[in-house]
Image: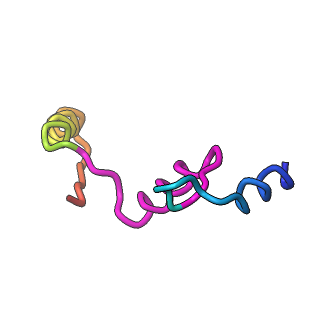
């Protein structure tokens, strides 16, 4: 597996592409981004979560 990954990492990207991607690359990139920026939640979802938290008597903390 390591040899396969190394082969692809050393390949030249296709015209117009900046890098070669292998399975798992987008997920790893997203994990780094989410750890730094957090997960965006739509305002309507935040509203629903606040209502549910109020019904359940738990605190809802939004970092948006």
Q: Work out whether residue 54 or residue 26 is closer to the camera in this orientation and state it.
A: 26
Q: Where is residue 50 in the image (x, y as percent from the top left)?
A: 17, 41
As drawn, 48 above or below 38:
above
Q: Residue at x 24, y 34 (%)?
A: 56
Q: Which residue is drawn at 86% across and 54% down?
A: 3
User: What color scheme is it?
Assistant: rainbow
Write the start and end of the magenta stretch as one range. Answer: 19-41
Left or right: 34 with respect to 18? left
Is 43 covered by the magenta stretch? no
As drawn, 25 above or below 45:
below
Left or right: 20 with respect to 34? right
Q: Which residue is drawn at 41% across and 57% down?
A: 34
- For the view shown, which residue lies furthest in the front direction? 15
Q: Work out whether residue 40 or residue 57 is closer to the camera in this orientation and state it.
A: 40
Q: Position of residue 46 (x, y in %)?
A: 18, 43
Q: In which quarter of the image is the C terminus?
A: bottom left
Q: Residue at x 65, y 60 (%)?
A: 12
Left or right: 30 with respect to 39? right
Q: Work out whether residue 18 or residue 57 is closer to the camera in this orientation and state it.
A: 18
- For the view shown, which residue lies furthest in the bottom direction? 36
Rendering quarter of residue 20: bottom right
Q: Where is residue 13 in the image (x, y as percent from the top left)?
A: 59, 57
As drawn, 52 above or below 2:
above
Q: Position of residue 37 (x, y in %)?
A: 35, 63
């Amino acid at each position: 597996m390591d040899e396969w990954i190394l082969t692809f990492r050393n390949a030249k990207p296709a015209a117009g592409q900046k890098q070669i991607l292998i399975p798992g690359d987008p997920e790893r990139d997203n994990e780094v981004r989410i750890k730094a920026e957090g997960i965006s939640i739509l305002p309507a979802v935040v509203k629903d979560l606040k209502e549910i938290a109020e019904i359940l008597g738990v605190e809802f903390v939004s970092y948006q």
